[in-house]
Image (spheres, rainbow, N blue to C red):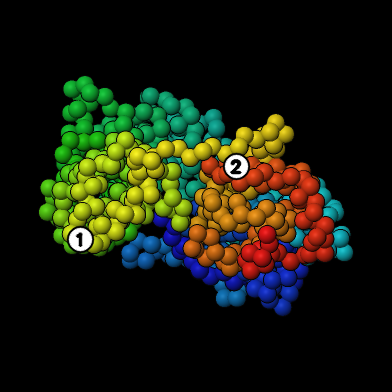
Amino acid sequence: MNVPFFNERTVWTARVNPGINRGYQKPMLRDGHLATWTAACGPVIYRGDQYPAAMVGDAFIPEPSGNMIRRQRITWKADGMPIAKNAYDKAEWLTSTDERFRPVNMVNGPDGCLYIVDMYRGILQHKVYVTSFLRKQIIERKLDAPIGLGRIYRVVHTGKKRKSSPKISSQNSSQLIAHLESDNGWLRSTAHRLLVEQANAKAIPQLRETATHSESHLARQHALWILEGTGGLDNETIAAAMGDEHPRVRIAALRVAEAFMAGLGNSGADIDARVALLTPLTKIVKDDNVDVRRQVALSLPVISVPGTEPLLRAFVAEHAGDAIIRDGLVTGLTGRELEFLQRVPGDAAWNNEDKNIRAILKSLAGCVARQRDGVRLERLLKLTAKQNSYFQYAVLEGLAAAAFPRGRALKPVAFKSQPLAMAKLAKSEDKTVRGHVERLGKFLVWGEAARPPKPPRVLTAMEQGQYDFGKILYTATCGACHQSNGLGEEGKAPPLLDSPFLVGPANRAIGIVLHGVTGPITVHGRQYNMSMPGLVGFQPEQVAAILTYARREWEHRAEPITAAQVKRMMEANAKREAPWTEAELLKLK
């Protein structure tokens, strides 16, 4: 799930911040100061023992564009979801009046302090994305120099004596295991790593003892994961951890049980080990902690123990109102969605009119659609045709929604003839069922419609060279946002697949690459209110290569772009500085 746990975007810097890439946009600056996050990076959760205890578990987030670091207090609501807010009112944990202070990363140190990596440069933005606004700032104030002055800071709490940094690399297993109970997170994690690297079989009994009897729940969690990493898990230790008094230990037990079960074979001893976990699993599905229940939904589908699926169905039906539990089930059933759906009709709890159960059925059906396996799709349609309208609505809605992601149809699945179950559903007396089947007719095809389309013209040798070069450039500059599959990323970039701004008139795509685009912009019926900067400093041949690749990748058939086309667009818009708007792009032909 994509769940934001704080919506507070305002920042409070100590100096004016004109040297940012989009300083010309109204929301970006407040009286010359950076007004909103724009370059958050390198966050860390404080796990040390040198600062006040109230700071443990808080997030520290560098904002190099604003020469500052935020302390974000994290608390947990009754529903198990985190919520975060600035620890200070209209102020920040650390700010600087030095424009070249560029904190880009933070880590917990062995002495319990936080360490800050400061890039210490006037220029922060990558040269490819520098806007004309920022370029002017760089030139006028000579922000390109000096360089090579990066530094690391240690932040010490003056109210407590700083401990010396321990040296533990040469310690034996027993000494390292003792560190698992430390309040210092760096010390625990380093001891953990060393124990896994040593993989000392003689340490396993002591680790099992720590996992089940240590007074520190943190030590119990570390011990479980070290056993998982060294092959030292056994069903007795896992079963005991599933009944632990601390919910985080119970969660860890569920997670390591996944790997433990996956490593078992079919011998008598292995089968006994599987069966032995059925009793603790039967108990943990009744856990009253919301975080544990959510982990049950994620882990139980992949823990291969005889008799767990009825347990899983009953558990999910009881807690289907929790969106994370619903998604956990779907995630855990990867590759087995159809088989789960085939057993649902025999379970009364899954056949009552319930919007949450219906959402799960839709999601599972959508997963089957995305597999694009004709045999499995035909089996699902056959199953659906025999069920009540409630089941039919959910499955057909799920198939249709998955077949047309973000308004673009998946590649059709071809059959020799119309599946009999689909023909039966198409004659349903229910108008809604018929409507879904009609829409699926563009995804499940047969006869003339199943014939592959005429292939696009073959690229010339020069165009193929452009395509290959463009793929490299796309991966380096565009792929992080628009993704290697062209589907974009929620909250970051719209899809490129069949986008009218990519495969439509060439000047639209060229204009966006040269000068960027600012939202709102609508792609496949969805509005995206975000900005993309132009690729500054790219030569016409490079722009042409990127666009040639994107206009021919993902089954696109648009014509390649030439360097000459890019040059003409450059000349026609030589004085342009602002990014394009949707209205302007649609006028380009």
- The answer to whether one can see residue 13 in this image is no
Determine contact: label 1, label 2, CB under 8 Å: no
Question: Is 367 situated left or right of 474 in this image?
Answer: left
Q: SS class of the residue under badge 1?
A: loop
Residue occupying the point 25% across, 47% down: 422
Residue at label 1? 430
Residue at label 2? 552
Q: Which corner quadrant holds the N terminus?
A: bottom left
Residue occupying the point 39% across, 43% down: 449
Q: Amino acid at mark 2?
A: Arg
When the figure is inspected, residue 289 is found, relative to residue 479, above or below; the finding is below
- The answer to whether one can see residue 179 in this image is yes
Nearest the viewer among 488 and 580 is 580
**x, y (%) of residue 534?**
71, 56
**x, y (%) of residue 171?**
50, 31
Q: Which corner quadrant holds the C terminus?
A: bottom right
When the figure is inspected, residue 216 is found, relative to residue 239, above or below; the finding is below
**x, y (%) of residue 117?**
67, 51
Q: Identify the residue at the far top of this view.
A: 267
Nearest the viewer among 244 and 49 is 244
**x, y (%) of residue 78?**
33, 66
When the figure is inspected, residue 96 is found, relative to residue 551, above or below; the finding is below
Q: Quadrant of residue 459?
A: top right
Residue occupying the point 52% across, 65% down: 527
State the mark number for residue 121.
Answer: none
Q: CA distance from mark 1 to mark 2?
A: 42 Å
